[in-house]
Image: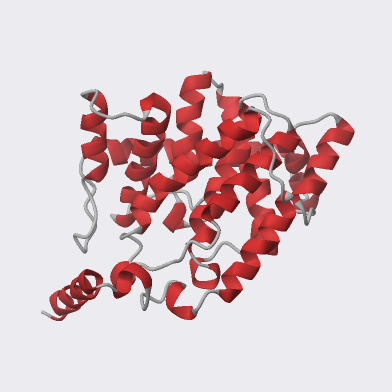
């Protein structure tokens, strides 16, 4: 676990030592775990490779879930992007495509990196790998960005939690979006303070997002929310790099997310009893899947 309890403490440590956030986080983790930094670096490099492998699998064909509720959407986006039919441009559309592809691999029981959860696994790699292409970031810069994301995620997990069952989808897709935003801001040359503002902006944009999986499966609407979370991260990244600041400090935003999660009723926290799961179509799909499982 991270020694720091606040993102602002990480920022101040980085500014005091003239380091990047990832350097402060890596040093802290090595000391806290009693391990060599190079060993931790290699482990994070391995996670980056797994993300790339998940993406390759997601783009190689139609990854259809056992339930049949999800799959093929990444392929549709990929073909539309190649045909020039999309409006978002290479960065936005590229991140959406990658986020969808990896989330579909998860739903099809493929291997992914929970970042911070399996249900939000497409957001961080989708944004990071797309930004790395645009920035022509090196392997080392991408691994470093993952340490930044990890440090931000650990603070959020300590203060507010990253479980949809405890805090709604804001805790999953919101946290992943915030982690991606902070990581890419720093990878793009932003300051530690700008990375913190990106984290705050991303979280604010998804504050209150409920967790309402249809039939209790991490597929609908979860996979498309990965695409939305990637887009949200890009908004926060651009605002922060432009010098836009979050009026509410990042750590107060994280605390607010916790309070909102506590206020959400149980029906909107991964129980499949409310939200989209309780719509006529959501209920019909749940009945059909239950019936199919009984046959």
Quadrant in which the C terminus is drawn: bottom left
The percent position of residue 189, horizontal first and vertical second, equals 66, 24
Q: How is the image coloured?
A: secondary structure
- For residue 59, which quarter of the picture? top left
Q: Quick check: 37 left or right of 105?
A: right
Quadrant in which the N terminus is drawn: bottom right
**Residue at the left extreme?**
295
Residue 234 versus residue 170 in the image, above or below: above
Image mark count: 0
**Residue at the top extreme?**
136
Q: Nearer the viewer, residue 33 or 85?
A: 85
- For residue 274, which quarter of the picture? bottom left
Q: Nearer the viewer, residue 183 or 193?
A: 193
- Residue 143 visible here: no
Residue 238 versus residue 171 in the image, above or below: above
Q: Quick check: 193 left or right of 141?
A: right
The percent position of residue 155, horizontal first and vertical second, equals 70, 55
The percent position of residue 145, horizontal first and vertical second, equals 61, 34
Q: Residue at x 36, y 32 (%)?
A: 93
- Residue 134 visible here: yes
Q: Residue at x 70, y 37 (%)?
A: 22
């Amino acid at each position: 676990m991270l020694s720091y309890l606040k993102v602002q403490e990480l920022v101040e440590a980085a500014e005091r030592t003239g380091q990047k956030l990832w350097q402060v986080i890596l040093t802290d983790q090595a000391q806290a775990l009693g391990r060599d930094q190079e060993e931790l670096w290699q482990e994070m490099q391995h996670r980056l490779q797994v993300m790339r492998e998940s993406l390759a699998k997601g783009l190689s064909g139609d990854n259809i879930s056992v339930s049949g509720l999800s799959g093929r959407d990444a392929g549709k986006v990929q073909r539309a992007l190649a045909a020039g039919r999309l409006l978002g441009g290479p960065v936005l559309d590229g991140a959406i495509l990658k986020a969808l592809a990896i989330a579909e691999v998860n739903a099809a029981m493929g291997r992914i990196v929970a970042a911070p959860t399996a249900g939000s696994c497409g957001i961080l790699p989708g944004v990071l790998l797309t930004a790395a292409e645009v920035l022509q970031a090196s392997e080392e810069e991408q691994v470093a960005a993952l340490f930044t994301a990890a440090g931000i995620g650990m603070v959020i997990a300590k203060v507010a939690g990253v479980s949809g069952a405890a805090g709604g989808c804001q805790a999953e897709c919101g946290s992943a979006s915030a982690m991606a935003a902070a990581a890419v801001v720093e990878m793009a040359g932003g300051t530690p303070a700008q990375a913190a503002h990106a984290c705050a902006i991303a979280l604010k944009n998804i504050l209150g997002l409920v967790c309402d999986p249809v039939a209790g499966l991490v597929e609908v609407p979860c996979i498309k929310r990965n695409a939305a979370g990637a887009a949200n991260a890009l908004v926060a990244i651009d605002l922060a790099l432009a010098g836009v600041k979050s009026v509410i400090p990042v750590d107060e935003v994280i605390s607010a997310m916790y309070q909102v999660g506590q206020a959400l009723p149980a029906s909107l926290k991964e129980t499949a009893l409310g939200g989209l799961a309780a719509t006529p179509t959501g209920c019909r799909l749940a009945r059909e899947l239950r019936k199919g499982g009984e046959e």
